[in-house]
Image (cartoon, grey):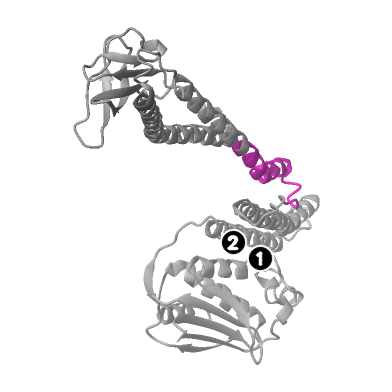
Amino acid sequence: MFTTWSVRARLTAAAGVAALLLNLLIATLVTPLVYLLLADYVSEQVAATSRRVAFTVERYAADDLLKPVAPVEDIDLIQVLDNKNEVRQASPKLVGKPPLTTVRPTGEDGRVDTTTCVPAMPGCLITVGFRVAVGDEYWMSYAFAPTVPWYIDVKYIAGMVGGALVLAGVTAWISSRGLRRALEPVSAIQNELAEITSTDLGRRVPRASHRDEFDSLAQTINATLDRLEATVEQQRRFASDASHDLRSPITAMRAQVEEAMLHPDDTDWEQTSRALMASIERLQALATDLLALARLESGTPGKQDRLDLGELVATELDRRTPGKTLVRSLEPGVFVVGDRLRLARLLTNLVDNAQRHAVSRIDVSVRTEDGCAVLEVVDDGAGIEAEQREIVFRRFTRLDASRNVDAGGTGLGLPIAREIAKAHGGSLTIEDSARGARFVLRLPMA
């Protein structure tokens, strides 16, 4: 049943039960103290009554023998015994009854404190007696009162339990109101989140009025919505760009096939085949790059081998066909941990990009710097403006200069290179250089 209760209901019930148990515990601990105080009070009342009766007997007993003694201070059990233990005076309730006790003091103070239990009286009685000098004899004045029960009184128990219940109820009520106000930000967040859809990701949940845990929750949710909105926007842009880039070669292929079908006798099939093959190669390149990006973004782990970055770069550069001048500056012993194929793909993408834009020379270097392995690829081309250095890492982004140099590029080489760098815990940036573009890869040292 409790599993279906709200947080507010569970906490309110817990607060009420805790308050009830605490109040009952306090009542249980306080009751013995109250008992002792009340017992002492009754004993003092009995002693005061017995002392007053002793004073009266000492002065007037000779003239008022056998006269009933009036109750004193609500103590209505009084007896006066002579030296023969005969009752000489008694309160109305004890008139005609035998002595309840004959205990006499043994000390010099003349006082007796005891408890009397006789069949004629219900329960035991607190008893205080004083020795009284009457002529040549010594009489005793006794006062009696019922002992205080351990539970003190039924009304006391009822009052304590009722008070505990009332205090527990007040605590639960205050807790419920406090929790309702405290949980209002959660309700506001819940309502706002329920209304946010994939087409309305610009909305944000309200922050709490106090800088507390709920406000931190709202900030975290808003930050998550920011990332979600950015991701969705990136996916939309990616889908739009991908559909555009995929549609272009498909459209060209369709046009070439339709033209050949309309004029089969006048068609140069060899030339048409070459054109179709170029479009197919572009589609294949796009599909390959999209698959590589999908694997990188899905977090598919690559191999974790200890690699000499300089040796890897040298091997990959040796495999390239001769083109523009490649100048190497490879420091040995620069070890990193990563996937050889992915790092080779990163290097290939950077060198291919430099190959398209360089005038005559490409510089490739490997070194250590500030505890990192650094790979640089620098070309002597026109370079990239500072405000466009991050734009080129967007998918399908190709600057005008790139389109003029190589219209067949996919626009995914540099984004793939950066994703590979991130997958290896590194970074890929474009930094200032005297001429051309300077791509700098930084990876953690092994």
Q: Earlier in the sequence, mark 1 or mark 2?
A: 2
Q: Please state the extent of the stretch shown in magenta in the rendering.
A: 175-204
Question: Image quarter for residue 143?
Answer: top left
Q: Residue at x 44, y 18 (%)?
A: 70
Q: Are marks 1 and 2 in contact (CB under 8 Å)?
A: yes
Describe residue 163's horizontal placement relative to residue 405 as left or right: left
Which residue in the structure is indicated by mark 2?
289
Please tell me in which quadrant of the rendered image residue 304 appears.
bottom left
Q: Position of residue 213 (x, y in %)?
A: 59, 53
Report which residue position mark 1 lands on.
410
Q: Nearer the viewer, residue 75 or 17?
A: 75
Q: Is residue 374 magenta?
A: no
Q: Is residue 391 above or below residue 38?
A: below
Q: Is residue 195 magenta?
A: yes
- Point out the residue furthest to the left here: 106
- Compared with 137, 378 (above or below) is below
Q: Position of residue 7 (x, y in %)?
A: 57, 36
Q: Amino acid at mark 2?
A: Asp
